Amino acid sequence: MTSIDGLMERARSLSPLTADLLVVAVVGLFTASDAASNDPDYQQADGLTWLLLAVSLIALVWRRQWPVPVAVVTGAACAGWALHGHIGELLNLPVIVALYTVAVLGDRRRTLWTGLVASIVSGAVALRVGRDVANPQGLPMLEMIWPLVPLLLGEVIRTRRQLMDEYAARAVRAEEEREREAARRVHEERLRIARELHDIVAHTVTAMTVQAGVALDALDTRPEVSRQAMRQVRDSGKEAVGELRATVTVLRDHDRDSTAPAPGLAQLPDLVGRFTDSGVTAALRHDGTADGLSPMVELAAYRIVQEALTNVAKHSGARHAAVSVARHGDRLRVEIVDDGPPPQTESPAKLGPPSQAAATEGFGLVGMRERAAAVGGSIEYGPVSGGGFRVRALLPVVLPAEALRGGRP
């Protein structure tokens, strides 16, 4: 079995011209031996016999380039032998190879037409030879069937090759699809990590900056207030380190989930309280009807509130902010409103795609938009008439299947 596989491998490694010449040599050897050993009662090999053989063999060299003309030439030579009186079992070997090539390199339509013509011609030659020869080569019906055998074999081989090529193409497409899916998941994971790090760092640094400013202002006149502010700085730093450690743990070992629970609605009172200690009076209204939500939805709501309050402390100049979390049907409504001064030119809320929003809105607003979209929700934000800024997010109570496809929150 090993020797046969080795021979097949060597045959595949041959160039087309070398393979064609090898086929011609083998066909010529068998056909010439059959032409030279005729029954004494029938026509012996003569000049016409060898001329027809030479024409057939020369034509077979170009069977790949012109399969149909080569089949016509070899078929005419085979018919010439029969009409000339030669009787042999291998004289039709050249036309068999030519007919196989017609089928294996063509299509089904050409194979059918070639088979029809070859069968008719072979049957007609058998009828003509049967009148002149006492022992003809075969019955007309059998002579009409044999040209179909190499055509059928070539059709089977060609169909098998096409199936193998299709299977290979499907495998390549499947691999490309897997690579695209893997790249998409990596991209989504990078965006998730970027949002987490931004929310942690931006929120904590903002709170620590505000608290440090309070400590500096009250250091000489109100030392107790200064110490309280510095304690808030310390606590905020510890919290940020803990969240960063949990995030890095997930990145280092993606097969092991972090043991620390993801922030959710239960942590909102502490979050709002820290901002109140930072100088922004924040009030929370949570009616408690939103319990039992998916952790991904709770994390999205928490981060949206965190980022909105961070923007209040950093950019709005507001002194008061109100946070409202309530369930309305199958939606969780999260709203943050501050009382900052009105902008010089009021404009409607920017609801463009994130790629455009990033250039004008900053990463905070884009991150809130992405978090809402990641769980199948929506978000609106913009200035309030008369002053202030509002962020309103509507998140699904039941997480849609497309949000689950992205993996862990």
Image (tube, rainbow, N blue to C red):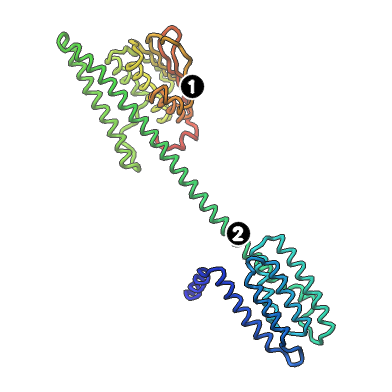
What residue is at 63 percent from the left and 69 percent from the top? 62
What is the x, y in percent for residue 172?
Answer: 51, 52
Q: Is residue 235 above or below residue 116?
A: above
What residue is at 29 percent from the left and 38 percent from the top? 249
What residue is at 66 percent from the left and 62 percent from the top? 106
What is the x, y in percent for residue 54?
Answer: 67, 79
In the image: residue 7, left or right of residue 29: left
Q: Which quadrant of the structure image shows residue 112?
A: bottom right
Of 209 and 406, which appears nearest the observer? Answer: 209
What is the x, y in percent for residue 205?
Answer: 28, 23
Residue found at the far top of this picture? 386
Of 350 and 49, which appears nearest the observer? Answer: 49
Of 356 and 136, which appears nearest the observer? Answer: 356
Q: Earlier in the sequence, mark 1 or mark 2?
A: 2
How crowded is the residue under tag 1: few (<14 C-alpha within 10 Å), some, or many (20+)? Answer: few
Asked if one can make out residue 291 in the rendered structure from this viewpoint, the answer is no
Q: Is residue 179 above or below residue 88?
A: above
Q: Which quadrant of the structure image shows residue 260?
A: top left
Element carrying mark 2: helix
In the image, what residue type sits under mark 2? Gln
Of 281 and 284, which appears nearest the observer? Answer: 281
Which label sits on residue 351? Answer: 1
In the image, what residue type sits under mark 1? Leu
Q: Name the residue under label 2.
A: 162
**Marks 1 and 2 in Cβ contact (< 8 Å):** no
Element carrying mark 1: loop
Asked if one can make out residue 184 in the rendered structure from this viewpoint, the answer is yes
**Marks 1/2: CA distance?**
51 Å
In the image: residue 288, left or right of residue 137: left
What is the x, y in percent for residue 236?
Answer: 25, 23
User: Which quadrant is home to the C terminus?
Assistant: top left
